C-alpha cells in the first residue's frame, strides 16, 4: 500500500498517518517531522529549513525531494509507505512520479482531509500553546493556510484526474476520522479486486 495523506495544516494528518500506517504495517513518512528533527538538532539542513518554516513558507523542493527519495528507498518501504506532507507542489508531484517509476511502484490512493480554515486556525493555536511551538503564531498559521491553498490544494485536482483521490471530513474525534479514512481505502481496495 502506497498512500499519500493530504490536507491543510492542522487537519490532523500526522495523527491519522500514524494510525493508518500502523493498520497497514507500513512506515509513515512525515516531512514535517524530518524538518523539525533537523531544526532541533541544529543540522545544516535544519538551519536552512528553519528560515522558511518560521515564515510559514515551504522548504525548497530540492531539499525536500532529496530527503523523500532517500527515505522511500530504504528497506522498510519495500511493501509500501504513507507520505504525510509530501508532495506539496506540482514539481514535487513530478519528482515523486519519477522516484516511484525508478522502483516500478505506483500510488494506490491519495486521501485528502478536508476541514474549515477557521477551525484549523483555532486548532493550531491551541496546539501551539500546548506544545510550546513558537513558530505557530496566528499570523504564521494564516500564512501557512494561504500557501497551502495556493500551492498544495490544486494537487487534489491532479490526483482526482488520475482517479486516486478520496476526500474525507477531517473534523471529529481521532477515531471517527480514522474510520472514515479506512472506509474509503477499504472501498477502493474492494473496487480494485477482481470479482
Image: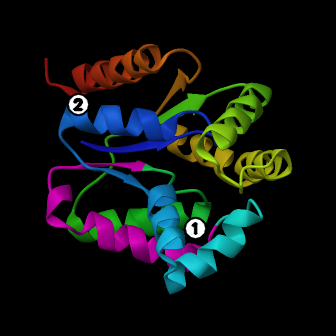
Q: Nearer the viewer, mark 1 or mark 2?
A: 2
Residue 133 vertical placement versus 71 (above, below) = above
Residue 60 vertical placement versus 29 (above, below) = below
Which stretch did the figure color magenta?
59-83
Q: Horizontal placement of 193 versus 37: left or right?
A: left
Label 1 environment density (alpha carbons within 10 Å; few <14, some 14–19, many ≥20):
few
Quarter placement of the N terminus: top left
Q: Which mark is residue 91?
A: 1
Residue 3 vertical placement versus 85 (above, below) = above
The answer to which of 113 and 187 lies nearer the viewer is 113
Disc 2 secondary structure class: helix
Q: Residue at x 14, y 24 (%)?
A: 194
The answer to which of 141 and 147 lies nearer the viewer is 141
Residue 156 in view (yes/no): yes
Q: Which residue is mark 2?
A: 23
Q: Main secondary structure of the magenta part?
A: helix
Q: Residue at x 46, y 19 (%)?
A: 177
Disc 1 secondary structure class: helix
Quarter placement of the C terminus: top left
Residue 135 vertical placement versus 166 (above, below) = below
Q: Quadrant of residue 76?
A: bottom left
Whole-percent x, y for residue 126 in the image: 69, 33
Q: Quadrant of residue 91?
A: bottom right
Label 2 environment density (alpha carbons within 10 Å; few <14, some 14–19, many ≥20):
few
Q: Horizontal placement of 122 versus 167: left or right?
A: right
Whole-percent x, y for residue 113 in the image: 55, 30
Q: Which mark is residue 50?
A: none
The number of numbered badges drawn on the structure is 2
Q: Horizontal placement of 146 versus 109: left or right?
A: right
Query: Does residue 139 show up magenta in the picture?
Result: no
Amino acid at each position: 500500500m502506497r498512500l499519500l495523506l493530504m490536507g491543510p495544516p492542522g487537519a490532523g494528518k500526522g495523527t491519522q498517518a500514524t494510525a493508518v500506517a500502523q493498520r497497514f504495517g507500513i512506515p509513515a513518512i512525515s516531512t514535517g517531522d524530518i524538518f523539525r528533527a533537523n531544526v532541533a538538532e541544529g543540522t545544516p539542513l535544519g538551519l536552512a529549513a528553519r528560515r522558511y518554516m518560521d515564515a510559514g513558507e515551504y522548504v525548497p523542493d530540492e531539499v525536500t525531494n532529496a530527503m523523500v527519495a532517500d527515505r522511500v528507498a530504504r528497506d522498510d518501504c519495500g511493501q509500501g509507505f504513507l507520505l504525510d506532507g509530501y508532495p506539496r507542489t506540482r514539481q514535487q508531484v513530478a519528482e515523486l512520479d519519477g522516484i516511484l517509476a525508478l522502483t516500478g511502484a505506483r500510488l494506490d490512493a491519495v486521501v485528502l482531509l478536508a476541514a474549515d480554515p477557521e477551525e484549523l486556525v483555532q486548532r493550531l493555536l491551541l496546539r501551539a500553546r500546548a506544545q510550546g511551538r513558537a513558530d505557530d503564531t496566528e499570523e504564521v498559521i494564516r500564512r501557512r493556510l494561504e500557501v497551502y491553498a495556493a500551492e498544495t490544494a490544486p494537487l487534489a485536482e491532479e490526483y482526482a484526474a488520475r482517479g486516486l483521490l478520496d476526500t474525507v471530513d477531517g473534523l471529529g474525534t481521532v477515531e471517527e476520522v480514522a474510520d472514515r479514512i479506512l472506509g474509503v481505502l477499504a472501498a477502493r481496495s474492494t473496487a480494485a479486486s477482481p470479482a
